[in-house]
Amino acid sequence: MARQRKVRSIIVLPDARLRQVSQTVPTFDQNLIEQFADMEAAMRSGPGGVGIAAPQLGDNRRIMVVDCTVARHSCRNHGLLHLVNPEIIEHSGDDVLGREGCLSVPDWIGMVSRARIIRLKYQDMQGETYEMEASGFEARVIQHEVDHLDGILFIDRVVSTHDLVRRMG
Ligand code: ZN
């Protein structure tokens, strides 16, 4: 029988761990693979989870998971991404406004301006370095998750607090 992975709970505001700057990952080992599995399980445990960053599980490492294939609206995307030490090295295209929510800020959504196209440098679980370009909704999700690694939440970036509204239903 398959071993059941216990879903770790996502920490929410005002937990101070969400506000820390996360540390660069120096070693690529089994522990990292386990952490990715925990993050993916937590991301998929709620409705509409398209990304999660390690600080949301109280882990202070620069790791995140993105999967925009499950987004309600279809978008160009790279499928399931396991990103270690991600770094946005280029922003391009006009900034676009879009609605954002966060598993760590339950019940709230807001309008945030993000670059339409980004170029991302990152490492995979084995420590190999890659670069990729993302656009549209996937670029938005990546920018949101990289912010988590720097202790920044989408509510810090909402255009105005009038745009921060309680999710209904
Ligand atoms: Zn978030």
Image (spheres, grey):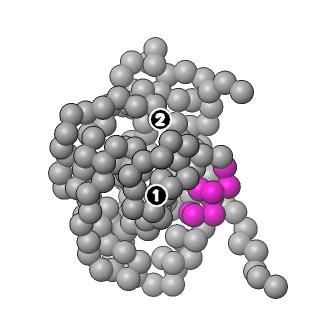
Residue holding disc 2:
100
Q: What's the magenta region?
A: 39-46
Residue 66, numbered circle: 1
Q: Residue 119, percent across and down?
A: 22, 55
Split into 4 quadrants, where in the image is the C terminus? top right
Front-most of residues 120 and 6: 120
Secondary structure under tag 2 reads strand
| Residue 60 seen in the current view | no
- Say if the magenta span includes residue 21: no
Would residue 16 appear left or right of 94 to someone viewing this image?
right
Q: Position of residue 112 (x, y in %)?
A: 38, 30
- Kind of residue indicated by mark 1: Val
Crowding near the residue tagged with mark 1, few <14, some 14–19, many ≥20 C-alpha atoms within 10 Å = many
x 38%, y 52%: residue: 76
Disc 2 versus disc 1: distance between alpha carbons? 15 Å
Question: Is 44 one of the magenta-colored residues?
Answer: yes
